Image (tube, helix red, strand yellow):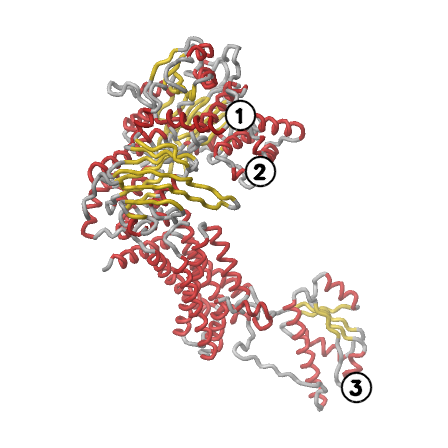
């Protein structure tokens, strides 16, 4: 065995011993992912359910009762009757209801003459996402009611277009099913970039880096010795997250496991490259943590399409997302979990990941010096 | 490898300069240092904190890019081929570079692998190093759980696994107890004798200079001198004396340091050590006038005497002559000196002691940090807690300040029981923390204003106290400077000023002068002495034997226990033997630990 191999193995062994003895590294690799999964799997839901809605009916009759009855039956709404529009608006201002559905006197008249009964809908727009969902739900409910009425009368509904939505890949439109796969990218960013930057900064802080540098070790050996253990740790965290996602949260895994593993490995290399680059600048754990969160975790969270749709971002921001490695990985994850091995998605994104990994690792290697300044 | 000729130097520094940026400032860490070190010798790189020692060490080890000048180690140009140099040298950084979450054996194995020690040779190497360092019984212990002295020896063992031709030790003796310090020197002597290793040893402790074959003395990045310790002391031969007179030692010191022709006056035992500006005692008439009944005994010069003489020379050359001393230096020039409780028996003074500690114990889980400690301190006394890192000094201190409850025992500070009236007692305490807890980003004025408000001073009284601090501590020139940019000596003055804002009766000083240059240390103690004369009780922790000389009384602590208490003179006297007629405090400390038969904090 050459001296260089001996040195590399010694450093890798040391790193594993430290990981095993340091609860904080294991916590970032396993406890934090588990917590994130639980929060996003159970706590955060982007679906609207049981939305409180004020119903104001100016002239109650059999038709209005049939329409408002639909709200009571729906799982999405919790209707409350208000006598006047003013009292309903006060309730919305106090955030007791999210939307107001107002049936004026022309409702029954319209239903009986043209077949299109007009309704007024006011939505609290503070939470834009909720507002859009509620608006859509109300519209769907209204169209459904009109159509049923027309069918009962034996004539075609007088709506210009009938929309019959069919949702592919996530038929239940459960936000959990696309959040949980995306989370795996967040978790691997944490282990790859944050943890690696932190442990190297710790070596600077404790003066052990200075001790290492003056031995015969070469800088490339120090870098590989950091890459290998945290790569293993990241893949371990990924496996645990996939198991949780599939077995605990019941997220389907429609693609193949080997595609998932291979692309995860590519993303992990990119994340480790970022971590190594950061550690070249940050010599204490506080700064390393700050940079890693701001430069890797937050972009991965916000600009990867994990929560916020990239296509609806402004053009400039959309361009920036191309610099975020997590963007490519999230696309792969969502497709592998929900759609299957869609090669037209996987191949270009995997290629992008490979390029980013090569750039980050190359930069880290080129900027690393066996010196303290 | 060809046998090196001893005539060829192992280290050659030629006009080494180094600057670095610290925020907006451009700092010259080294301003042209040239020196050589011969093979097989021990060279001391000596200077106070901030002198540039670590920068120089790192340049020699090839860890910093050489900006200007030339560094040659074992005939190799470090700037050109740092890897070749690193393969042949051993380097122990400050804090020893150990992995605290690995065991002793794991650390040794790691460094053996990193230094290409063949597996076949390891057993023999371990068999040599473990007994030499006394680590044999502790190979399975985590390095983080070793005492400071043992960490230092493990760090050393790790650098010695592949016997280096050139060994760099960056401040290996900071915070380490005297016993470990002595053992380290024994190992170094063994290395230079047996394997002709060259050693470069940096330290801020001037007394270590005398153990080196040669000394490189730097101060503020500049070379003050290089040569054998004997050459340094020879320059001031015949100018060191021990003075005594019919006065208290502090009073005598204050008067002599103000007298013309005396460069330095420090307390040593019952007498005052002085260094004169020139040989002969031509000016002694002046001195006798200042201190009637003065008698001078010539004494061999120390390295520190020469350093102080050099620094005074620089100060004189750079600045207009100062008035001999500020009025506070001689507080009671005409009136008879007030009775100072040199406190052989605190019970003998009519006043009740200001601090009473009885059977104080503090446990952290199964670990006993402080065990059955008792002492009493009278008004106006300077009392020292002397011991290595981990001896229990800081824990005792925190309990005295009411920051940490005691597990058992009784504590009274300024007449208050700390269990029931910690806040009241604390209002009478001033505290100056190690490394001076100043707000580095605030200016001097803002620090003073903040600390005075923190002590609840306001209005006219606050203004008056700030004015007092500015005048008393000569801070007017730096009022708007940021605390971070102050020289160490100024930082120390500002920290002391902040601690004195509310005119406390008791002053706690935690390692107050470790690492500051000898002039700043003298200046600091002059102020502390004046405070004590005015009735303030002073408690000092230190691991620095020199500092202990300034105390009226002290206790020596090790492993949470009190090993001895008394005056510096009585403690030294207890270690007097035929072969050691005039022991130092350090000798006494070592003798006590040997007698106790315990390895410190083992």
Query: Do discs 1 and 2 share a chain?
Result: yes
Q: Is B406 situated above or below A13?
A: above
Residue A65 pos. (x, y %): 74, 77
Q: Is B245 in front, or is B341?
A: B245
Are the residues under badges 3 and 2 in a single subunit? no
Q: Quadrant of residue B499?
A: top right
Given residues B126 and B584, the one toward you in this image is: B584
Kindly report the distance in space between the C-alpha atoms of the residues bearing marks 3 and 2: 82 Å
Residue A113 is tagged as: 3
Neighbour tally class for label 1: few under 14, some 14-19, many 20 plus, Cα within 10 Å: some
Please state the chain letter of the residue tagged with numbered disc 1 in the rendered image.
Answer: B
> Could you tell me which chain the residue with mark 3 belongs to?
A
Q: Mark 3 near mark 1, Cβ–Cβ under 8 Å? A: no
Residue neighbourhood size for the residue with mark 3, other residues' Cα within 10 Å, grouped as few (<14), some (14–19), many (≥20): few
Q: Nearer the viewer, residue A14 or B219?
A: B219
Secondary structure type for disc 1: strand
For disc 2, the chain is: B
- Does residue B111 appear anywhere in the picture? yes
Q: Earlier in the sequence, mark 1 or mark 2?
A: 1
Eyeballing the image, is A288 above or below B413? Answer: below
Q: Residue B443, labelled with which disc? A: 2
Helix, strand or loop for disc 3:
helix
- Occupied quadrant, residue B457: top right
State the SS at label 2.
Answer: loop
Quarter occupied by the C terminus of chain B: top left
Q: CA distance from mark 1 to mark 2?
A: 35 Å
> Disc 1 vs disc 2: which is toward the camera?
2
Q: Residue B129: image x %, image y %?
A: 23, 42
Residues at marks 3 and 1, CA–CA distance in whole angstroms: 94 Å
The residue under the point 37% across, 15% down is B280
Tell me, for residue B416, which label it has, or none.
1
């Amino acid at each position: 065995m050459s001296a260089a191999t001996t040195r590399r193995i010694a450093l890798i062994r040391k790193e594993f011993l430290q990981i095993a003895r340091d609860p904080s590294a294991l916590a970032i690799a396993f406890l934090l992912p588990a917590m994130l999964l639980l929060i996003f799997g159970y706590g955060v839901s982007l679906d609207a359910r049981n939305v409180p809605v004020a119903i104001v009916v100016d002239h109650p009759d059999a038709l209005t009762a049939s329409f408002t009855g639909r709200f009571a039956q729906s799982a999405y709404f919790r209707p409350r009757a208000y006598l006047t529009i003013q009292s309903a608006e006060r309730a919305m201002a106090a955030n007791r209801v999210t939307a107001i559905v107002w049936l004026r006197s022309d409702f029954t008249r319209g239903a009986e003459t043209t077949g299109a009964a007009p309704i007024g809908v006011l939505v609290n727009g503070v939470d834009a996402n909720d507002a859009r969902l509620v608006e859509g739900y109300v519209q769907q409910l209204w169209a459904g009611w009109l159509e049923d009425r027309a069918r009962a009368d034996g004539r075609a509904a007088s709506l210009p277009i009938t929309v019959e939505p069919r949702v592919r890949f996530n038929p239940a439109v459960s936000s959990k099913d696309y959040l949980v796969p995306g989370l795996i990218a967040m978790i691997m960013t944490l282990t790859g970039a944050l943890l690696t930057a932190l442990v190297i900064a710790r070596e600077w802080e404790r003066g052990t880096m200075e001790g290492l540098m003056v031995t015969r070790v070469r800088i490339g050996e120090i870098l590989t010795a950091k890459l290998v253990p945290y790569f293993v740790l990241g893949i371990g965290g990924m496996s645990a997250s996939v198991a949780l996602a599939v077995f605990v949260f019941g997220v389907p895994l429609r693609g193949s496991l080997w595609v998932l593993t291979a692309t995860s490995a590519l993303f992990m290399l990119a994340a480790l490259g970022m971590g190594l680059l950061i550690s070249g600048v940050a010599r204490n754990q506080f700064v390393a943590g700050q940079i890693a969160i701001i430069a890797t975790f937050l972009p991965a969270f916000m600009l990867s399409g994990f929560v916020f749709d990239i296509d609806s971002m402004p053009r400039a921001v959309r361009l920036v997302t191309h610099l975020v490695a997590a963007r490519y990985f999230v696309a792969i994850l969502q497709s592998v979990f929900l759609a299957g091995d869609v090669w037209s998605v996987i191949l270009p994104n995997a290629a992008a990941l490979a390029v980013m990994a090569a750039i980050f690792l190359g930069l880290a290697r080129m900027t690393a010096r066996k010196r303290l300044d | 490898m060809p046998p090196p000729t001893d005539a060829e130097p192992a280290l050659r520094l030629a006009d080494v300069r180094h600057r670095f940026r610290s925020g907006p400032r451009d700092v010259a860490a080294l301003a042209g240092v040239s020196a050589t070190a011969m093979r097989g010798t021990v060279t001391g790189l000596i200077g106070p904190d901030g002198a540039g020692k670590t920068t120089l060490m790192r340049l020699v080890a090839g860890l910093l890019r050489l900006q200007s000048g030339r560094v040659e180690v074992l005939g190799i140009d470090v700037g050109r081929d740092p890897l070749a140099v690193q393969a042949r040298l051993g380097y122990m950084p400050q804090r020893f570079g150990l992995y605290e979450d690995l065991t002793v054996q794991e650390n040794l194995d790691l460094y053996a692998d990193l230094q290409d020690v063949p597996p076949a040779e390891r057993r023999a190497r371990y068999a040599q190093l473990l007994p030499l360092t006394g680590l044999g019984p502790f190979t399975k212990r985590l390095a983080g759980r070793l005492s400071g002295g043992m960490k230092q020896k493990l760090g050393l063992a790790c650098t010695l696994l592949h016997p280096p031709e050139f060994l760099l030790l960056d401040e290996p003796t900071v915070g380490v107890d005297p016993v470990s310090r002595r053992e380290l020197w024994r190992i170094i002597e063994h290395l230079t004798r047996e394997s002709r290793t060259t050693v470069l040893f940096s330290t801020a402790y001037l007394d270590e200079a005398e153990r080196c074959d040669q000394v490189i003395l730097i101060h503020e990045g500049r070379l003050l001198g290089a040569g054998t310790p004997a050459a340094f002391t020879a320059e001031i031969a015949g100018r060191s004396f021990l003075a005594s007179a019919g006065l208290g030692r502090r009073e005598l010191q204050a008067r002599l340091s103000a007298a013309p022709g005396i460069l330095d006056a420090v307390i040593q035992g019952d007498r005052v050590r002085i260094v004169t500006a020139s040989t002969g005692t031509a000016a002694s008439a002046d001195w006798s006038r200042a201190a009637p009944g003065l008698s001078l005994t010539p004494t061999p010069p120390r390295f520190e005497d020469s350093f102080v003489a050099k620094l005074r020379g620089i100060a004189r050359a750079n600045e207009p002559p100062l008035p001999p001393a500020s009025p506070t230096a001689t507080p009671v020039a005409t009136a008879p000196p007030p009775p100072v409780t040199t406190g052989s028996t605190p019970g003998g003074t009519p006043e009740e002691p200001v601090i009473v500690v009885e059977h104080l114990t503090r446990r952290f889980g199964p670990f006993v940090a402080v065990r059955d400690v008792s002492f009493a301190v009278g008004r106006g006394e300077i009392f020292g807690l002397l011991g290595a890192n981990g001896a229990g000094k800081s824990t005792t201190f925190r309990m005295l300040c009411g920051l940490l409850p005691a597990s058992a025992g009784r504590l009274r500070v300024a007449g208050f029981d700390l269990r029931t009236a910690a806040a009241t007692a604390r209002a009478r305490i001033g505290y100056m923390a190690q490394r001076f807890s100043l707000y580095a980003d605030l200016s001097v004025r803002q620090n003073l204003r903040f600390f005075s408000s923190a002590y609840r001073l306001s209005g006219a009284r606050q203004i008056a106290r700030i004015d007092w601090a500015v005048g008393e501590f000569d801070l007017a020139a730096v009022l708007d400077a940021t605390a971070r940019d102050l020289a160490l000596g100024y930082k120390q003055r500002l920290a002391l000023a902040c601690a004195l804002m509310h005119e406390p009766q008791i002053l706690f000083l935690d390692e107050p002068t470790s690492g500051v240059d000898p002039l700043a240390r003298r200046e600091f103690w002059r102020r502390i002495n004046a405070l004590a004369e005015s009735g303030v009780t002073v408690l000092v922790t230190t691991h620095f034997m020199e500092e202990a000389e300034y105390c009226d009384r002290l206790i020596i602590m090790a492993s949470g226990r009190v090993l001895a208490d008394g005056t510096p003179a009585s403690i030294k006297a207890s270690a007097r033997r035929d072969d050691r007629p005039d022991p130092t405090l350090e000798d006494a400390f070592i003798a006590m630990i040997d007698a106790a038969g315990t390895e410190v904090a083992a």
